[in-house]
Image (spheres, rainbow, N blue to C red):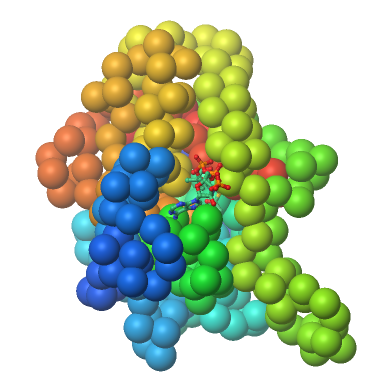
Amino acid sequence: MAATEYREEQMTGRITGLGSYLPEKLLTNDDLSGIVETSDEWIMERTGIKTRHIADHMKEVPSYMGGIAAQRALEDAGVSASEIDLIVTACSTPDKMFPSMACYVQKAIGNDGCMCFDVSSACPGWLVAFNTAQCFMESGNIRKALVVGTECLSNYVDWTDRGTCILFGDGAGAAVIEADETMPANKFIMHATSNKAECLTCESRMQPDRWEEEGFLKNTYFQMDGRDVFRFAVTEVPKIIKELSAKYEFDLNDVDYFILHQANARIIETIAKRLGQDIEKFPMTVYDTGNISTASIPNLLDRMKKEGKLKKGQKIVMSSFGAGLTWAANYIEY
Ligand code: ACO
């Protein structure tokens, strides 16, 4: 059993391993145009999404996908499961109400005894999980953590609503972070406002007394005011990134990559413009994954690593936004 003993050194974690999982089944824009009234041209122009991965719902549930992504991250880091002190998982679409998804990830990797819990903060959930793990590390309580994002959004999409079903996909991503004495302190900002909560919601179906209520079951699928969410993202993400650079005194021109939540290429392009930064610094996977919520940032990082784009010491800004409304940004050294 892994023992999480108190350690006195207070260190920040460096990402040392990355892993991801995407279901094999693909759903293209042309496939979607056979389900709802839409077209490849409309979806590409408004979102930049061409295809998305859709889970086999009998097998590729979030606990399963998160477990595989975590195993792959451990392999990539060269860390054994028993060395992990903490698993934090972010998931908005869990296949079990309890135990936590983190406990299933623990089982999948073969750890016994480490701390395990989930965080719920919609799409920025993976950044929230990352910052939570960093706080544990900086308090000197842990040395190695797994931070996982995993989602099966296709189960929560109304497949008759062309305004939402074109956007989302399924998948998981994970990172191993290890305490490193050469790392500067973790730099982050997280915000939430419930004033605009109604522009992105999904009610729990487990309220059987309400099933007869008019419109209730419809509300157990994604309900979104796309224009409001778009406006929120292109306003608040540039603002929080500027706030981050002012708070931690770094120059945005020195940032190697801006790793943004992969919701919509048009949102990312607008943010790049508003920050006055070259779009080449904003890598994207949204083209072939769609929006995979908490899994989007670790998934993108994993792909960049496999493509040889990540080098130790690079300066990276990560930022995400989602239901709540919530938004967050980090400035890290890779
Ligand atoms: N195909 C064809 N037409 C469509 C489609 C579609 N898939 N969806 C909507 N339309 C129609 C609408 O019915 C509307 O028609 P009308 O003018 O006759 O009424 C027209 O297109 C314009 O609709 P809008 O909703 O205004 O389209 P918009 O340009 O805003 O694009 C979109 C919609 C792509 C959803 C955009 O608003 C967006 O990307 N918003 C952000 C969404 C997002 O990122 N959400 C998730 C973030 S948080 C998280 O990850 C959970």
Nearer to me, 328 or 236: 236
Q: Quadrant of residue 222?
A: bottom right
The structure residue drawn at horizontal position 26% and vertical position 63%, both measured from the top left corner, is: 30
The structure residue drawn at horizontal position 32% and vertical position 30%, both measured from the top left corner, is: 282
Number of numbered discs present? 0
Q: Is residue 212 left or right of residue 104?
A: right
In this view, 125 is above or below 212: above
The structure residue drawn at horizontal position 36% and vertical position 49%, both measured from the top left corner, is: 43
Q: Residue 138's spot in the image, x, y percent? A: 56, 40
Nearer to me, 209 or 81: 209
- Residue 146 visible? The answer is no
Nearer to me, 280 or 142: 280
Q: Is residue 149 left or right of residue 4?
A: left
- Residue 311 visible? The answer is yes
The single residue placed furthest to the left in the displayed view is: 308
Nearer to me, 224 or 188: 224
In this view, 167 is above or below 114: above
In this view, 122 is above or below 67: above
| Quarter of the image where the C terminus is located | top left
Q: Residue 87's spot in the image, x, y percent? A: 50, 63
Q: Residue 277's spot in the image, x, y percent? A: 36, 15
Q: Quadrant of residue 33?
A: bottom left
The structure residue drawn at horizontal position 29% and vertical position 69%, both measured from the top left corner, is: 31
Q: Residue 212's spot in the image, x, y percent? A: 83, 87
